[in-house]
Amino acid sequence: MTSPPDDGAPSLDRLRADVRALLQRLEANDRQFRGLARSVFRVQEEERRRIARELHDGIGQNLTALKHQLSLLTVEARDPALLAGLEAGVDLCTQTLADTRELSRLLRPQVLDDLGLAAALRWLGRAVGEKAGLTVAVDADAVPALDDELQTLFFRIAQEALTNVVRHSGAREALIAIGVRGGQAVLTVWDDGRGFDVAAALSAASEGASSGLGGMRDRVALHGGWLRLESDADGGTRVQAAVPLADGAAP
């Protein structure tokens, strides 16, 4: 008497094949999602670049011309009240022009496109430090070869982290450093200010209550990297972001 055929083996093989196909579809969908999300950020940065250029080249130049015309009128003004009004107009133009240029640089600093990440981080440290009374050291001598997208990513993370330092920490000193470690480009932003509850902050970010931390974490994850937060009431706060380097990238 012969044994009945084993019907379990073909079914198991089919199940394994179905699981493999499902995993492949999930991986393909994940790659597609990452690509779409990164495209959204690229479009966002292009729009920032366009608006920054319009502010600098359009509104900025018009304000400069208006300031020049008002200055010429002050030379010819004889009435004290008129002269005072013209001088006030010149001062207002000067302040508005400075604000417009600062907004343009914050939207998309020209130095990032012209001179690269290292120069942009040094500019960011100076600009934020001078305005907030914060001493910001920048160690960017070992910046690896990065494409435009990753340079923008690291700049935005440093910008957001420094903004949080100024708003919440009460720090006196801060550090921005970037280099290569274990095949990854690693950005570190440290400050000596008040610490915070990291778990609570990340929980708030996951629930959408805090867009800054959540945005940094999500943007790094889209490039296959990680974001780490360390904070202590006595030892300040450290934000680290790392992204794998492409083959051949070097300091």
Image (tube, rainbow, N blue to C red):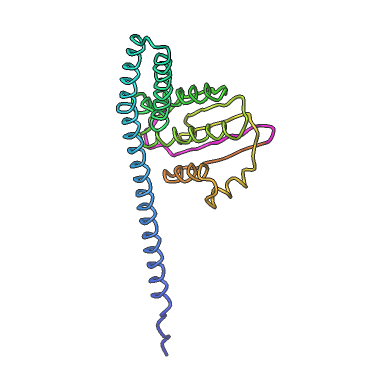
| Residue 64: x %, y % from top left | 33, 20
Q: Choose between 140 and 82: the one closer to the eye.
A: 82
190 horizontally vs 48: left or right: right
Asked where in the image residue 60 lies, by quadrant, the reply is top left
Q: Choose between 194 and 107: the one closer to the eye.
A: 107
Q: Choose between 232 and 246: the one closer to the eye.
A: 232
Q: Choose between 123 and 63: the one closer to the eye.
A: 63
The residue that appears at 35% across and 49% down in the rendered structure is 36
Note whether 98 is above or below 50 in the view shown: above
The quarter of the picture where the C terminus appears is top left
The residue that appears at 48% across and 32% down in the rendered structure is 159
Asked where in the image residue 90 lies, by quadrant, the reply is top left
Q: Most extreme residue toward the bottom, as rendered?
A: 1
Residue 242 in the magenta stretch? The answer is yes
Residue 63 in the magenta stretch? The answer is no
Residue range (magenta): 233-251
| Residue 185: x %, y % from top left | 45, 34
161 horizontally vs 148: left or right: right
User: Number of labelled discs?
Assistant: 0
